[in-house]
Amino acid sequence: MTSQAKLDAAMRRLPLVAILRGLPTRDALPIGAALIEAGFAMIEVPLNSPQPLASIAALAAQHPDALVGAGTVLTRAQVRDVHAAGGQLVVAPNVDADVVRAAVQLGMVCLPGVLTPTEAFAALAAGAAGLKLFPAELIPPAGVKALRAVLSAETWVLPVGGITPEAMAPYRAAGANGFGLGSALYKPGDDAGAVSAAAHRFATAWQALAGASR
């Protein structure tokens, strides 16, 4: 399966990326199980978390049908480390063509962070499977609509940053295909029960939006 096909399949299941920044490895499996039970298909452990590669390895082994990987990936060496741990997803806050190409060469899904049309097209030219619009706090829905107008309809666009269940509707109406979810879904110290409740709120909110747009 190509990296694009991997992302396409995950987006069809539930186009929400769980960002577990600060996740302790001991909590990886119970929190991962709570997310999968809620319908999540994409899990990201940022590399500035404690022992992120150990968490990624545990999650990838436990949930082989999910798209598991790392965020805050800044170098080719980090891409290789994530791949060696079993990760299939590379997310970055920026566009680095070398990072994108390294991920694609290893068959991984890469979602680089973009803020402008120039960055968006550079990311796609390098082989990005989709675009992380980051930080979403600086890109209102009107900006997403303008960017969406010049991108291919097939390009996945996911705002990230400050997203809550209530904030999704205007971005969805502007053309967002999904979202990356941070502290409104998980904060260090949250247990599996808290994450399960938040995950179900997000999944329910998305399903309502997706149903309304049909």
Image (tube, grey):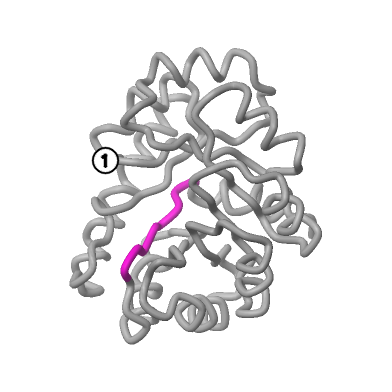
Image point 65% across, 65% down: which residue? 79
> Dividing the picture into quarters, in which one does residue 46 lie?
bottom left
- Expressed as whole percent of the image width and height from the top left, the position of residue 74 reads 56, 56
- Expressed as whole percent of the image width and height from the top left, the position of residue 14 reads 48, 50
Q: Nearer the viewer, residue 125 or 157?
A: 125
Residue 85 sits above or below residue 144 on the image: below
In the rendered structure, the answer to whether residue 66 lies left or right of residue 109 reads left
Q: How many marks?
A: 1
Image point 23% across, 34% down: which residue? 166
Q: Nearer the viewer, residue 136 or 94?
A: 94
Q: Is residue 17 magenta?
A: yes
> Dividing the picture into quarters, in which one does residue 208 lie?
top left
Residue type at tag 1 = Pro
Q: Nearer the viewer, residue 190 or 13?
A: 190
Image point 39% across, 58% down: which residue? 19
The magenta stretch spans which residues? 15-22
Most extreme residue toward the bottom is 26
Q: Secondary structure at mark 1?
A: helix
- The residue under label 1 is 165
> Dividing the picture into quarters, in which one does residue 126 lie?
top right
Image point 55% across, 66% down: which residue? 69
Quadrant showing the N terminus: bottom right
Crowding near the residue tagged with mark 1, few <14, some 14–19, many ≥20 C-alpha atoms within 10 Å? some
